[in-house]
Amino acid sequence: MTSPPPGSSWFGHPRGLSTLFFTEMWERFSYYGMRGFLILYMTKVLGFTDPHAGAVYGNYVGSVWLAAIFGGVIADRWLGHYRSVLLGGIVIALGHFTLALHALPFFYAGLSLIVVGTGLLKPNVSTLVGSLYEQGDERRDAGFSIFYMGINLGALLGPLVAGKLAEGVDWHLGFACAGVGMTLGLLQYGLGRRRLQPAMDRLARRPGPPATAAVTGPAGGFTPEDWKRMTAVVVFFAFASLFWGAYEQAGSTLNLFADRYVHLELLGITLYASWFVSIQAAFVILLSPLFAWLWVKLGPRQPSSPAKFALALLFVGLAFVLLMPAGAIAQGGVKISPLWLVAVYFIEELGELCLSPVGLSVVTKLAPKQVVGLMMGVFFLSNALGNKLAGWSAGFISTTPLPTLFGVTAAVTLGAAAVMFVLIKPVQRLMGGVR
């Protein structure tokens, strides 16, 4: 592999990675910044009931993931990846600025614009990152790790800045702040266009999908081995949906819980409920290098992909077990320490790092090459379904005793973990030697 020409690399990576790193960082800043106070705005300002706010929240966040499936197809068939990201960013910024206007129709219009824009931007930024590297370039995985840090840096800073402006100054200023974040990302993206030219050239040279007539073999071109592997992807999808249903309650149920039941002060500092959404991203940044080191260190002795999924469900279940006594204390009339939620998010993050990177990797390895995009879309649907479940569960916070509400989530996820542990060997057989 030839070394990059002097002055043309960013930490030893193509300079285009810096452009995409900051574009995605600002996009996630805007997305998580607004998501951090969205359900609070609905219940406190718009006067929505908890079930109504939970349903709108779940529909919005679920639709964002659903739209990503169509965004990839639109880029492949019509717009191209560069223009899809550019147009997506413009639509997202318009959505946030629309939310900054007061009338209720602007609220729904703004959310709809963000769904459409994120659908265009999210899958295609990742495609551009991969295309910065030639086939077989060993820097690619490390490049994605750096990019993943950009995502989490945005997710960490967004709720802290936009959340403080929304809850501490003016709600509509919080929405506008998210719009400014996306605008900064667009500026970064436009100015760095030249650096992305190699990635766009590689994408243009890619062979198109094979004509259906050319696909030979039984059952639409799939071998029995392919069908088994696709069945394994569906199993992973089902368990990932349950995981995200618990994990994504950070922005819904646990956001309302923080606002109503947590003592919002620590070491003399006034806290905001929306800030707690940042804790997950902070733990990702701290723990990701540790997990990367652990998997390399364990090598062939590391848990298999189905075992990692089982561990993820176990961790998220244990986090909700910890919330049961916290809920009981809180409903007794005592505001609980914010450290309870910090501990909960730490345990959840151990689970997320077992499932999220592993899930994406295993789908690319298992899916037959003619349907790899479709299977990735199926796996992304688990995020959509999980977020819908997370919004739905928030609707019960004012009508169900908290230990019961948290206990049901704990029981479902721990039960799913037990089933997944039992299924490790059968799923490995379906995977046919893929780890």
Image (spheres, rainbow, N blue to C red):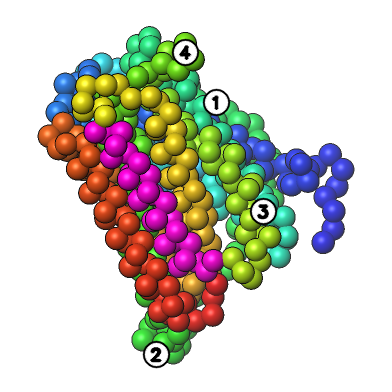
Q: Farthest residue in the bottom direction? A: 218
Does residue 61 show up magenta in the picture? no
Above or below, 237 relative to 80: below
Above or below, 225 relative to 92: below
Mark positioned earlier in the residue sequence (4 or 2):
2
Mark 4 highlights which residue? Answer: 269
Mark positioned earlier in the residue sequence (2 or 3):
2
Mark 3 highlights which residue? Answer: 293
Q: What amino acid does circle 3 point to?
A: Trp
Separation of residues labelled 4 and 2 (CA atoms): 65 Å
Secondary element under disc 3, as helix, strand or loop, is: helix
Does residue 315 show up magenta in the picture? yes
Above or below, 371 relative to 245: below
Mark positioned earlier in the residue sequence (4 or 3):
4
Residue neighbourhood size for the residue with mark 3, other residues' Cα within 10 Å, grouped as few (<14), some (14–19), many (≥20): few
Q: What amino acid does circle 4 point to?
A: Ile
Residue closer to the observer: 410 or 155: 410
Secondary element under disc 2, as helix, strand or loop, is: helix
Separation of residues labelled 1 and 2 (CA atoms): 51 Å
Mark positioned earlier in the residue sequence (1 or 3):
1
Mark 2 highlights which residue? Answer: 218
Q: Are the residues flagged by discs 1 and 2 in contact, CB closer than 8 Å?
A: no
Separation of residues labelled 1 and 3 (CA atoms): 34 Å
Residue closer to the observer: 425 or 237: 425
Q: What amino acid does circle 2 point to?
A: Pro
Mark 1 highlights which residue? Answer: 184
Q: Which of the 4 image quadrants contains residue 339?
A: top left
Q: What amino acid does circle 1 point to?
A: Leu
Mark 2 or mark 3, whichever is nearer to me? 3
| Residue that appears at 64% across and 31% down | 191
Return the x and y of residue 52 as percentages of the image width and height. 16, 34
Mark 1 or mark 3, whichever is nearer to me? 3
